[in-house]
């Protein structure tokens, strides 16, 4: 229940922040596609995981690595970032989103396939989360000007 609730709330908070920031700058923003895609992806991932719980044989036949990476909430976050980059027409955000998705797929596949039980979950969250954190810091540093003229 944590991930679906957290994702839906996160999409709502991000949308409110984006709308407020764009109004302060006097420009419009297209945040609705991002919110709709994000909530849809969160619900789809939840449905996929519930289906996997009730059909464990399909999961076993597909193999845990790539299947678990594609059916993870971090992957849903990356897909929503791709939608946001398209709505905002921001190539730098698209690059960050695609890089993040690659990291999610690699960490999800490698950790699941290697069988590092206790370490798998933190690694699958900390490494991709660090990519998003560093990307956010990069976008902050790229903003100009740092100080407003008096």
Image (cartoon, rainbow, N blue to C red):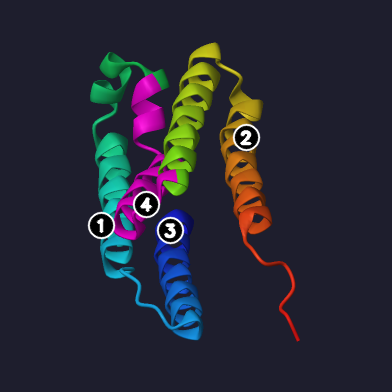
Q: Which mark is residue 127?
A: 2
Q: Which mark is residue 85?
A: 4
State the predominant SS element of the stretch in magenta.
Answer: helix
Q: Is residue 38 left or right of residue 20?
A: left
Q: Residue shown at 35%/72% (left/top)?
A: 29
> What's the distance in space between the residues labelled 4 and 1, CA to CA?
17 Å
- Between circles 3 and 1, the one closer to the viewer is 1
Spot occupied by residue 114 in the image (x, y as percentages of width and height): 55, 13
Question: Could you tell me if the residues under marks 1 and 2 are in contact, i.e. CB atoms within 8 Å?
Answer: no
Quick check: 27 above or below 34? below
Q: Which residue is mark 1?
A: 40
Question: Could you tell me if the residues under marks 2 and 4 are in contact, i.e. CB atoms within 8 Å?
Answer: no
Q: Residue shown at 40%/52% (left/top)?
A: 90
Question: In front here: 45 or 78?
Answer: 78
Q: Residue shown at 56%/33% (left/top)?
A: 124
Spot occupied by residue 51 in the image (x, y as percentages of width and height): 24, 40
Q: Is residue 87 among the parts visible in the rendering?
A: yes
Q: Secondary structure at mark 2?
A: helix
* Marks 2 and 3, the one that precedes in the sequence: 3
- Span shown in magenta: 66-91
Quick check: 19 above or below 113? below
Question: Could you tell me if the residues under marks 3 and 1 are in contact, i.e. CB atoms within 8 Å?
Answer: no
> What's the distance in space between the residues labelled 3 and 4, CA to CA?
28 Å
Spot occupied by residue 136 in the image (x, y as percentages of width and height): 61, 52
Mark 1 neighbour class, 10 Å CA radius: few under 14, some 14 to 19, many 20 or more: some
Q: Quarter of the image holding residue 26?
A: bottom left
């Amino acid at each position: 229940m944590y991930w679906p609730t957290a994702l839906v709330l996160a999409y709502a908070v991000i949308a409110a922040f984006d709308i407020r920031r764009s109004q302060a700058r006097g420009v419009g923003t297209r945040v609705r596609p991002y919110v709709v895609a994000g909530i849809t992806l969160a619900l789809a991932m939840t449905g996929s995981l519930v289906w996997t719980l009730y059909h464990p044989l399909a999961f076993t036949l597909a193999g845990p690595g790539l299947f678990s990476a594609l059916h993870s909430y971090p992957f849903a976050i990356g897909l929503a970032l791709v939608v946001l980059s398209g709505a905002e027409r921001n190539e730098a955000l698209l690059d960050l989103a695609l890089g993040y998705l690659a990291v999610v797929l690699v960490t999800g596949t490698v950790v699941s396939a290697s069988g590092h039980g206790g370490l798998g979950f933190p690694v699958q969250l900390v490494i991709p989360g660090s990519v998003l954190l560093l990307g956010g810091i990069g976008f902050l540093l790229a903003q100009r000007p740092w100080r407003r003229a008096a």
